[in-house]
Image (cartoon, rainbow, N blue to C red):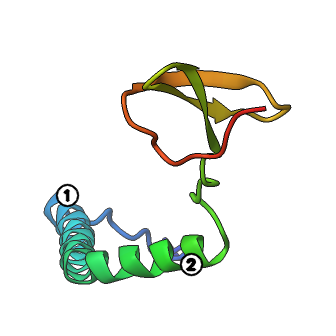
Amino acid sequence: MSNQSNHPPVLSHPNPRERGQGLVEYALILVLVAVVVIVVLSLMGPSVGAIFSNVVTGLGGMRQPPQQLCQRNTRPGLWEVFRIEQGGALTYLGGETVNPGHPTCP
């Protein structure tokens, strides 16, 4: 009878320093990728922002409708200016001493 068994040889566990070396290599790769991303974004960031702004403007976003203003001559020489809200309501904006040139309020 033989003392040798048919079991494959047991591999010894890798040295802890070798396992740590693999971890350090992955960390270095991640740091390198992060540095490249930061450099690319810092160089191209303003142009990318301008492109997105142009797209938003082209789609009609962030555009406010012009205010519709009207005026009333409440006393001689005093014209009060109002903003016409949706539904026809008037919001008082202030009085002026000269004719501001807006249409007369209804």
Whole-angstrom CA distance, mark 1 to mark 2, is 54 Å
The one nearer the camera, 87 or 102, is 102
The one nearer the camera, 45 or 66, is 66
Of tags 1 and 2, the one toward the viewer is 2
Looking at the picture, does residue 19 appear above or below residue 39?
above
SS state under label 1: helix
Percent from the top left, x then y, of residue 82? 59, 29
Residue 7 visible at all: no
- The answer to whether the residue labelled 1 contacts the one labelled 2, judged by CB atoms less than 8 Å apart, is no
Whether residue 102 sits left or right of residue 46 in the image: it is right
Of the numbered discs 1 and 2, the one sitting upstream in the chain is 1
**Residue sitting farthest toward the top:** 75
Residue found 64% across the figure and 54% down from its top: 65
Q: Quadrant of the N terminus?
A: bottom right
Determine which residue is flagged by label 2.
Answer: 55
SS state under label 2: helix
Which mark is on residue 16? 1
Whether residue 74 sits left or right of residue 105 in the image: it is left
Percent from the top left, x then y, of residue 14? 27, 66
Quadrant of residue 16 in the image?
Answer: bottom left
Whether residue 87 sits left or right of residue 28 in the image: it is right
- Neighbourhood count class around disc 1 (C-alpha, 10 Å): few under 14, some 14–19, many 20 upward: few
Which mark is on residue 37? none
Residue found 57% across the figure and 70% down from its top: 56
The one nearer the camera, 46 or 61, is 61
Residue type (three-letter) at the residue carrying disc 2: Val
